[in-house]
Amino acid sequence: MTAPDGTAVRLEQAERKIRSLSIWIALLIGMVGGLVSGIVARVLDAPMAGAVGAGGGAFIAVSTLALVVEARINKN
């Protein structure tokens, strides 16, 4: 059933915007996870390179997990 007033087009635009925002939120969650991991590693007397590595690894892991969860939730 197609609406005559362009509702389908507006719905498609809204879905694209929601998808874009959810990807940005997943990346921001990864950034927070990476920062927390790096700070905790440095507080626990890890060398600077080790703290940066821990933060980077946590960013990748948390962002990937958030994107996978987001993709599973928004699956059609």
Image: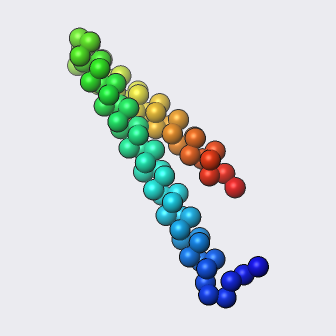
Tell me the quadrant of the picture where the C terminus can be found. bottom right
Q: Position of residue 14 (x, y in %)?
A: 53, 68
Q: In the visual, does 1 lie left or right of 24?
A: right
**Residue 74 in view, yes or no:** yes
Q: Residue at 68% of width from left, 83% of height from top?
A: 3
Q: Position of residue 47 (x, y in %)?
A: 24, 14
| Badge count | 0
On screen, 46 above or below 72? above
Q: In the visual, does 76 lie left or right of 67?
A: right
**Residue 49 in view, yes or no:** no
Quadrant of residue 2 within the rendered picture:
bottom right
Residue sitting farthest toward the bottom:
4
Residue sitting farthest toward the right:
1
Q: Position of residue 59 (x, y in %)?
A: 40, 33
Q: In the visual, does 4 lie left or right of 24?
A: right
Q: Nearer the viewer, residue 1 or 62?
A: 1
Q: Residue at 52% of width from left, 57% of height from top?
A: 19
On screen, 51 above or below 11? above
On screen, 60 above or below 28? above
Q: Residue at 48% of width from left, 58% of height from top?
A: 20
Q: Nearer the viewer, residue 40 or 61?
A: 40
Q: Position of residue 65 (x, y in %)?
A: 53, 35
